[in-house]
Amino acid sequence: MAETFPDYDVLAKRNTPSWNERTRDVIDARMAKVERPDILAERQRDTLRAVTARVVPQPAHRAPVNATALVLDKIGSDNGDGFRHHELPDVREAWARGLDAIDAEAKSRFDTGFARCSAYQQDEILASVQNGDVKAPDWATLPPKLFWSWRLIPDIVSAYYAHPSAWSAMGFGGPASPRGYVRLTTNRHDPWEASEQKNDELIPAKVRNRHGY
Amino acid sequence: MAIDPEQTPRAKNGRAPDVMTPGGWVSMREYPENEEVDFVIVGTGAGGGTLACKLAEAGFSVVAFDAGPYFRPLEDFASDETEQNKLYWTDDRIVDGDHPIKMGSNNSGKAVGGSTVHFAMVSLRFRPEHFKTRTALGYGVDWPIDWQDMWNYYDEAERALHISGPVSYPWGPKRGRYPLRAHPLNAAAEYLARGAEALGIKWTETPLATLSAPIGQSAPCVYRGFCVTGCSTNAKQSVLVAWLPRALKAGAEIRDLAMVGRIETRNRRCTGVHYQREGEWHFQKARNVVVAGYAVETPRLLLNSANEEFPDGLANSSGLVGKNLMVQLNQAAWGQVDDEIRSYKGPPSLAISEHWNYDDDKDFHGGWSYMSQGPLPITWAKSLAGGRNLWGQALIDEMARNNHSVGLKMVGEVLPYERNRVTLADDTDQYGLKIPRITFSLGPNEEAMIDHATDFMDKSLEAVGARERWKEMDDTCHLGGTARMGFDAKTSVVDADCRSWDIPNLWVCDGSVFPTVGGVNPSLTIQAIACRTGDRIKQMSARGEL
Ligand SMILES: Cc1cc2nc3c(=O)[nH]c(=O)nc-3n(C[C@H](O)[C@H](O)[C@H](O)COP(=O)(O)OP(=O)(O)OC[C@H]3O[C@@H](n4cnc5c(N)ncnc54)[C@H](O)[C@@H]3O)c2cc1C
Ligand code: SF4
């Protein structure tokens, strides 16, 4: 799909009143995160990287999102968000077993590891986990549908949408404190929000907000 | 280098953080552990924080504990969903049942101020009949408190929180004006309003606990829209900002990063609490103990405090501690429109209809309300991935259409069932305490209400031209029950004054005392109950009845 907000970059607001100091600190730190080599085995990290690339493809024309690094960070912290489904183990163990099982699923279907499968094959494997129609025996102790909906999806999606590139691509206002917003009503936006491209035309805020537009 | 409030307690050495100034302090009275204080309060959220203020202002000595950090929103809060996870209770909990509840950000806070630090500020009164559902409407159980009595305390809470609301509220008994004017509608709220009008029902601006005019040191809301991840401007009238500064001024002590693990009893009365702070266990003596940890931690503490005198846990002669856990239904309807909505701006729920709380022409029990919505990116991505099974490029593309998405979300009444409950698991947490197991299943009544509500909200969206509509069927919010108040010791845990039937100097004052949850968000009711309990304790004390 074509970019909807081609001239918009949340990061351009970093030094404006939309970002307080605390926000600058935490987002700088997040964007600087690289994949920790001490979390999971190398093969599991390869699988995770490949899974992440399929579940949340990189934005086309923007700085890449370090989603794999952020998921690894979360796995390292072993923080389960305050709840654990009774049929699933802790975060770290669920991920280790889940990634092994996805790899095993690739072997049983395509006779090679998940990271080496084609994108098409990878999607087929992921869909089998999502729908629970898996073949590998590794899933006997890890319900695939639960792993998918309670662990894999929330963790990967939360990592990706914690990154400014993902916010820019969706036209989200991003951090907004202390300066919030003035124009709240239908079809109005502030000059510091994303302008949307419609029919190949970009309508900036000052035109958009004119009465009778 | 500033101390990290998540690692090192701030409220110490005669001072507590001044929430209104970066780096600021206010003085705080401190009580030695071997001094028997009048009240120890466990939890500083909607129930505990409000009660701490009321009791301190009544002249009692009060020490209020919270397991969470003492934040200064102006310096500690980022505009960021991920960073603000630090506000939630993320300790290990096991969930099971047919519909296991997602905890954490969905319903549980761990900070001084409790879950109100990240609540959405919707501040509503129960429908009067919802205090007497058994006798007035034929389902659930009655509350032992009268609605007229509650109306006075709702007034008090609304004034303390400077609620902004409409000039006249369309439902319920005639009421006075809200303290502040209503906030303007955002586009999502305009869509609710037009939909309600098309379907011929009433709507109004949502009464909210965020300022629409400057009050004291708080500036008005700037419509930044990050409310459920904490308000970094202090416009939000959380317990942290509204009640606790008053409590400190009146001489209460607040202990942050202090986890209470066990309540001690001797001769069938409480003598104090064991708590962990800075890695060590301590004991604080008290004449009375109030538990206000919310509907999971409250029963957990009562059960974890089992001893020889009370082998089944404290206040549990009825066997009801932990039972009758209720959530509220939080299903939604969504659609796409040509207009730009950009619902990330402003408090998430600026318009509301309570029509179905007050109309009893339904084929199920209970009420529900619905509000406009403004999900932040991670929340929205999880909704799309979970509710529509989107991932890959389909998810990314759909996310890029979010500024044209519009939705309505219900807050619906779940009935009390004993099978829905909090028990103790065998695993232990970082404090060495047994963790809770939370068992929850919906019943046919809830399923019927979900169908009714999601159909109605879908119709409202259809009426205003939304296309590609879909229903988000798997979401819950707000907890209640597990230490219900009632009329006698057999069928309830505490009486109308939140006092336990079994142990006269043990009290519960939070969302767990709700016998039924009604169809509105609970925190104003919790705060009103705390105001009432404070007054009742003062009266009983004057009569020598404590
Ligand atoms: C995202 C979100 C949005 C919400 N929006 C609304 C809304 O718009 N309107 C509304 O009315 N309600 C809303 N709520 C619900 C509302 O916040 C809660 O119902 C209310 O805060 C509960 O009050 P409480 O006193 O029972 O518990 P809480 O406010 O949760 O306070 C409990 C406190 O006790 C502490 N604690 C627990 N156990 C211990 C222990 N053993 N030792 C020491 N401390 C302990 C916890 O750290 C916590 O701070 C929302 C909740 C969430 C999560
Ligand atoms: S929208 Fe208002 S209440 Fe919400 S976080 Fe922003 S300033 Fe605070």
Image: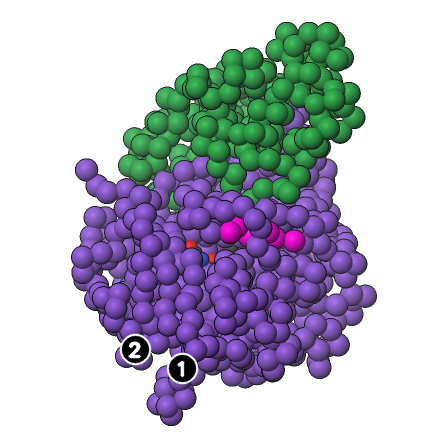
Chain colours: A green, B purple
The residue that disc 2 covers is B60
Q: Residue at 25% x, 51% y: name it.
A: B10
Task: Using the rendered image of the protein, determine whether residue B332 is visible from the camera's viewpoint.
Answer: no
| B126 over B109 or under it: above or below | below
Q: Residue at 40% x, 63% y: name it.
A: B42
Residue A142, quarter of the rendered image: top right
**Chain designation of label 1:** B
Q: Tag 1: residue type?
A: Ile
In the displayed structure image, the side of residue B327 where residue B152 appears, left or right: left
Q: Which of marks 2 and 1 is nearer the N terminus?
A: 2
| B411 over B223 or under it: above or below | below
- Residue B435 within the magenta-colored segment of the rendering: yes
Outermost residue on the front side: it is B308
Residue B537's tag is: 1
B433 vs B545, nearest the viewer: B433
**Chain designation of label 2:** B
Give x and y (percent) for residue A207: 46, 33
Give x and y (percent) for residue B259: 38, 55
Q: Which quadrant of the rendered structure holds the N terminus of chain A? A: top right
Q: Pointer 2: residues within 10 angstroms few (<14), some, or many (20+)?
A: some
A48 vs A12, nearest the viewer: A48
Q: Tag 2: residue type?
A: Phe
Q: Residue at 25% x, 71% y: name it.
A: B35
Magenta stretch: dominant secondary structure? strand
The magenta segment is B434-439
For the residues bearing labels 2 and 1, Cβ distance under 8 angstroms: yes
Give x and y (percent) for residue B371: 60, 55
Q: Distance between the residues labelled 2 and 1?
A: 10 Å
Circle 2: element type = loop
Task: Using the rendered image of the protein, determine whether residue B133 is visible from the camera's viewpoint.
Answer: yes
